[in-house]
Image (cartoon, grey):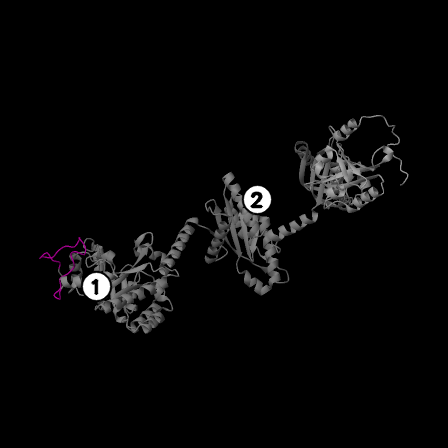
Amino acid sequence: MPNIEDPLDKVPTPKVDSKRLSLIASASRNMILILDAAGTIEWANPSFLDNTGHELKNIFGIRPPELLQGPATDTTTLRRIVRELHRVNQFEEEILLYTRTGEPFWVHAFGLPIGEEHGVEPGFIVIMNNISDHKHSERGLRIAANVFDHSHEAIIITDQKNHILDVNPSFCRITGYSRADVLGLNPSILSSGRHSSAYYRSMWKSIEEFGFWRGEIWNRRKNGEELVELQSISRIHLDESGSYYHVANFTDITELKNHAKNIDRAANYDDLTGLPNLQLLKERLHQAQIQADVHQKSLSVGYIDLDGFKAINKNFGAETGDKILRIMASRLMQGLRSGDTVARIGGDEFGLVLQSDNHDAMYDRILSTINEPVDLGDEAGLISITASLGITRYPTDNADAEGLIRHADQAMYAAKDKGRNLLHIFDPELNEHRQQKRAQLIELNRALDNKEFELYFQPQVQIADCKIIGFEALIRWNHPHKGLLYPDAFLPTLEASHLEVPLGQWVLEEAALQMGLWHDAGEDLSVSINISARHLMDRNFAPYLENYLHSRPAIKPEQITLEVLESTSLDDIKRASDVLARCKELGFRVALDDFGTGFSSLSYLSTLPIDLVKVDKSFVINMLNDSNDRAIVESVIFMGQRFHHPILAEGVETMDHAHALSDLGCEYMQGYGVGRPMPADNVLEWSRQWRQRHPKRGVSIDNDADPRLSAGRDGIPSCQ
């Protein structure tokens, strides 16, 4: 056994009651174990039992390593302790042990062999102190030191007087200063001079009130180069009364800021001219709208397009075109006042936001600036440029930023349509009307797809004997929400639209279908169909009719009359005449409708190949009370007779109308006095009843058709 100085040998052996010694061991906060010569547990004090969670009765005869070892226990340390136990040597170690429930805890263990020289059986006394808190603090310090040394962020620690106590390696790497350079100095050695005293006062005020500040700050490296830092400063209070420290950490974001600046420029500015692009124009316009609302002012949005710029590019090349665009951008920039914006939207188009007063003078100056000749030098000499300018005004035009730019664009195209090198101002009311028309066209297109249209039929009869000569097809719209709509509620919207031809074809096909159904029921009834000027002048009109007849040989074209409105302008009378002549070759009849309401009556009568002239109802209804209307009706009938065209009068409501028209030589009539427009399903029954009331000798207008009709001498209306 090694010659080890036993601490018990130095202490005299007083006579102490063993019970007192036992009380001391039991009261100690240290964990105490007594092991036998084989190293198994003979006794444990209450502190050991409390710390480990074991009960004394359950641990007798067990070696401590078997009882306290866990997953993270250092096996090398454990083997060293066991070796010393076998050698009966004292030991002192720090080791991680585990409680009965598996919770780890650190102990400082001191083992002392005992034996006969102490008047006891051979064995060991093991005294353990729980040092978990110390170990955790030590680990935290090691981690903190490691973070301090290896952090990618620069770290500065200063004292209460803001003198630098320490800096980490990243600080030295970022700033170029060594640790020795800065110890004891104030961090102000890094100052770039960019920030005002007020900026720093605000920073320290935040640290005083909240113990923290975070923000961007411009500093300077040792070599004089500026850098941008994202910096945080915290005030740290320790246990020492009244003392504190400052810990500042920062990241060099100079490259990131430069990259962001480049991204911002690429995202918001035009490469060629350096002007804001469309995206930035929208953002600035939105902010300008907010300011205009706050200060109750107006602003203008402009859209500029250089006239004929494609030709310049073609004749002089893209490089010259780019040069002109840069010159125009520079001129526009110089012509604006503070708060205004000019942007390049794309190609040869520029956008404007004018917040200043006296906008009208600005518009003229902008166009004048563009009109100044551009000197291209030897390339092409002086070249003149003009532009079309569209303007909309906020809040008169109360659209959002994107809508204002779109409206200015629309106004610019209107300026081009008027002749270029002009200004046009957007009219919100007119635009609203266009939007309403567009919405109704969408609804009409849906109605056509959903088969919501229906044809009504109004009878036409011969005045002399009341013989039915046919029915005029009149369109109705069975609107899903508004009910049955008459033509004047939707046909004006269709004029000059893409739906005019498809709807005209539907009317023709639907009328032909009804004629076929009536024929199958034993009635050969003729039908008149209104044809719009756009439909008639469509280059596919005659070929369409020809193909339609070819695909449906049962249709009798001579029973179909195509009615052309005289009140509708036919821009090319010669072409219209040729188209109608082709229709007559196919077997169709042609009528001139609403005669007398237009301005080309005589030319139409003499030029167009027509079979029938219809007098407009607006003259017929009032002809009995208005001498002027009667004169017009008389003149129309006279002209029709001179050109050998039979006449049909619309708007016949009473017997007196019929007699007056007959006296003037009118052959046919149509109106409420004969019959109101009716669904196709009612036509056959109406025809049967009409013939019953008016046999061949001819009794006239049905008194039941309209309460305003007057009866004949025998109480029954009669023809002639």
Q: Which amino acid does label 1 sit on?
A: Leu
Q: Is the magenta stretch mostly helix, strand or loop?
A: loop
Residue 714 magenta-highlighted: yes
Residue 413 visible in the picture: yes
Residue 228 position, x and y percent, is: 70, 44
To which quarter of the image does residue 41 belong? Answer: top right
Residue 256 position, x and y percent, is: 68, 49
Magenta range is 695-717
**Relative to 544, 688 lies left or right:** left
Residue 719 visible in the picture: no
Q: In which quarter of the image is the N terminus?
A: top right
Neighbor class of circle 1 (other Cα within 10 Å; few <14, some 14-19, many 20+) is some
Q: Camera-side residue: 632 or 465? A: 465
Is 199 rendered above or below residue 419? Answer: above
Residue 173 position, x and y percent, is: 77, 46
Residue at mark 1:
684
